[in-house]
Image (cartoon, grey):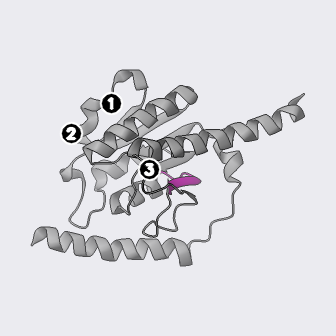
Amino acid sequence: MKTILKNFFAKIIGAYLRSQFRWLAKESPINIVEHLARAKKVLIYMPNKIEHFGAALKSLEKLRAKRPDWQITVVTKLELVSFIHDGLRVDILPYGDEDINLLGLPKWSLKKHFRNASYDLALDFLFNFDLLSLKLLQLSMAPVRVCFDSSEKSWFYNFGIRVNPVEPLANKYNVMVKYITVISDSHLQSASPQLK
């Protein structure tokens, strides 16, 4: 019964948050390409399913190789922390069931991380709508918020990556890493002649 109630309230809150950013948010338009080129602090919400997590982790390794200067914070389930090796040089924001309230929203134990932290870029590595990831990425205050394109995703995200549903998981995560890095690289290359 508790799980049914939690899912019911999560759907209601999720619908509200999705509509809130579509109809109520008054954000100024931003140049996503320029923001990606200047990004330094990055928040990544990792998937919970182990097969998705493994594929996302390999893409995270590729992202780290392409962006060694980024300060990356990874949000992940407590039981998956041990899979993230020290060589990745990422900060880890772990959470467990005790950090999430009955409605599926973060408790203070998770929210306090964002009290003195802000991010330039937030990446959601989930394929479906998730209330917790939406709320945490909202708290990140990142001007660029990237997700996999889906009809379930919130208007809160301002950059959606479209992937072929039949592609292997690893390819889907690699597409996000490729888009993020290629777009920011292209801006840097086009701006370089002006620096001379």
The residue located at (47%, 76%) in the rendering is 19
Q: Quadrant of residue 36?
A: top right
Q: Pick whichever, 110 or 75, lies toward us.
A: 75
Circle 2: residue type: Glu
Give the Cα separation between the discs numbered 2 and 1.
11 Å
Q: Residue 58, percent across and down?
A: 40, 33
The residue located at (16%, 72%) in the rendering is 4
Q: Residue 66, percent across and down?
A: 57, 29
Does 93 sit left or right of 160 as displayed?
left
Lower position in the chain sequence, tag 2 or tag 1: 2
Q: Quadrant of residue 105?
A: bottom left
Does 123 sit left or right of 15 as displayed?
right
Disc 1 designates what residue?
Answer: 84
Q: Residue 177, percent across and down?
A: 53, 41
Give the Cα separation between the discs numbered 2 and 3.
27 Å
Q: Can residue 187 be found in the magenta stretch? A: no
The residue located at (25%, 67%) in the rendering is 103
In the current view of this chain or complex, which residue is farthest to the front?
166
Q: Which label belongs to residue 79? A: 2
Q: Pick whichever, 123 or 137, lies toward us.
A: 123
Q: Residues within 10 Å of mark 2 (few under 14, many from 20)?
A: few
In the current view of this chain or complex, which residue is farthest to the top?
87
Q: Which span is picked out in magenta?
A: 140-147
Q: Which label belongs to residue 167? A: 3
